[in-house]
Image (tube, grey):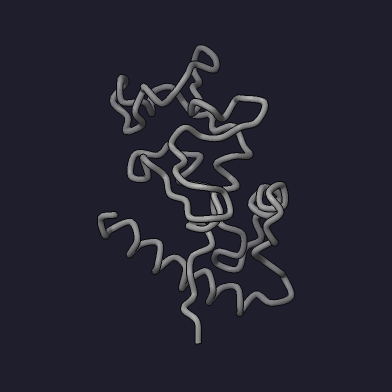
Amino acid sequence: MSEITNPCVSCGACCAHFRVSFYWAEADDAGGPVPTALTEPLSLLMRNMRGTNDRAPRCVALEGDIGGCVSCGIYEQRPTPCREFSMSGEAGIHNEACDRARARYGLPALFSPSLPVMTESYAAAGARELSEHVQSPG
């Protein structure tokens, strides 16, 4: 039997598909956790992660190859949009944005509403693994 892995650590599509914009005070020069050096101004009150406002977006904090092994270089300091973005199927809830980002890179959708019990257990196992991955150093 193969071990279930969190799809997020072998994906990274969301980090290379969407602009990550957030309130300017989330940056560390304003008392927030996000490293200012990895951001750029978007408007008077908003910043975005460098690289995510480009024609071919890719967050500067994304490490690794999309669809391979990936991680966030500032996971504990990531901005609110990243903290709030959930994997499709997490808690049995479809996240169309997750599946759309995955499709852009040729990765299959993670959630099928016809299999909510299966996906919930898959997501729960993945969340445990992600928690263990984040807590243990490289």
Left or right: residue 114 compared with residue 64: right
- In the rendered image, residue 120, in percent from the top left (x then y), is placed at 56, 73
- From this view, report whether residue 113 is shown above or below residue 88: below
Of 6 and 56, nearer the camera is 56
Q: What's the residue at 68%, 49% (across, down)?
A: 105
Q: What's the residue at 51%, 57% (across, down)?
A: 8
The image quadrant that residue 18 belongs to is top right
Q: What's the residue at 28%, 25% (across, down)?
A: 31
The image quadrant that residue 138 belongs to is bottom left
The image quadrant that residue 93 belongs to is bottom right
- From this view, report whether residue 51 is shown above or below residue 43: below
Of 20 and 137, nearer the camera is 137
> Which residue is at the far left?
137
- In the rendered image, residue 137, in percent from the top left (x then y), is placed at 25, 55
- From this view, report whether residue 84 is shown above or below residue 45: below
Of 110 and 85, nearer the camera is 110
Q: What's the residue at 48%, 28% (across, down)?
A: 49
Left or right: residue 15 compared with residue 60: right
- In the rendered image, residue 5, in percent from the top left (x then y), is placed at 48, 69
